[in-house]
Image (tube, grey):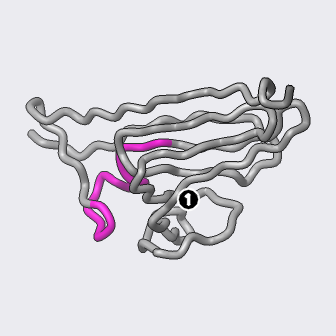
Amino acid sequence: EPFPAVVGWHPWFRRSIDGVPASWSLHAAGMLTRDASALPVAFADQVSLGPHDDAFLVPSASAQISWPGVLALDIAASDPWFVVFDELDEAMCLEPQSGPPDGLVDHPWAPARLVTPGQPLEHSVTWSIRDLRADRA
């Protein structure tokens, strides 16, 4: 019997390395707005200013975290959904996912993905770390 599924990563990253604050970037086509219970209720073409605990539709399926002059982390995923959580001072999350939060049900912005033995849910992510300290020399 087919069933809906969403998978994703939930990594945490330090907000600063060697005293250098992190910043994240992604090129979103829009974001999901949430109700008081944190469930998505609409898709907005405009991306609001943070802090965020929000889902973004990223057509390139890529994002980056940078600690300027220290490290950069490039994230390339097989699906265009990312959740950003940057509400804490000490840590942040940039989460590649196969679908949006509450993706087990159909929504106008993303229908539920049904999984069957013949159509498994596959989600891949490539994490590329660049040492930027060599660039300082």
Instruction: Point out residue 104 in the picture as x, y percentages from the top left corner.
Output: 30, 52
Q: Is residue 32 left or right of residue 121?
A: right
Residue furthest toward the right? 19
Q: Residue at x 42, y 51 (%)?
A: 60
Please report the residue visible at 19 percent of the width from the left and 33 percent of the height from the top.
120
Q: Quadrant of residue 50?
A: bottom right
The image quadrant of residue 78 is top left
Compared to residue 127, the image places residue 44 above or below, namely below
The stretch of residues the image draws in magenta is 96-110
The secondary structure that most of the magenta stretch takes on is loop
Q: Which residue is mark 1?
A: 54
Q: Is residue 101 above or below residue 118?
A: below
Residue at 83% x, 44% y: name it: 21
Horizontal side, residue 70 vs residue 83: left or right: right
- Pick the quarter of the image with the C terminus: top right
Residue shown at the point (42%, 72%) measured from the top left: 43
Judge whether 86 appears above or below 137 on screen.
below
Element at label 1: strand
Q: Is residue 130 magenta?
A: no
Q: Residue furthest front?
A: 137
Q: Is residue 38 above or below residue 78?
A: below
Give residue 51's quadrant in the image.
Answer: bottom right
Q: Nearer the viewer, residue 11 or 30?
A: 30
Q: Position of residue 24 (x, y in %)?
A: 66, 49
Asked if the magenta segment contains residue 103, the reply would be yes
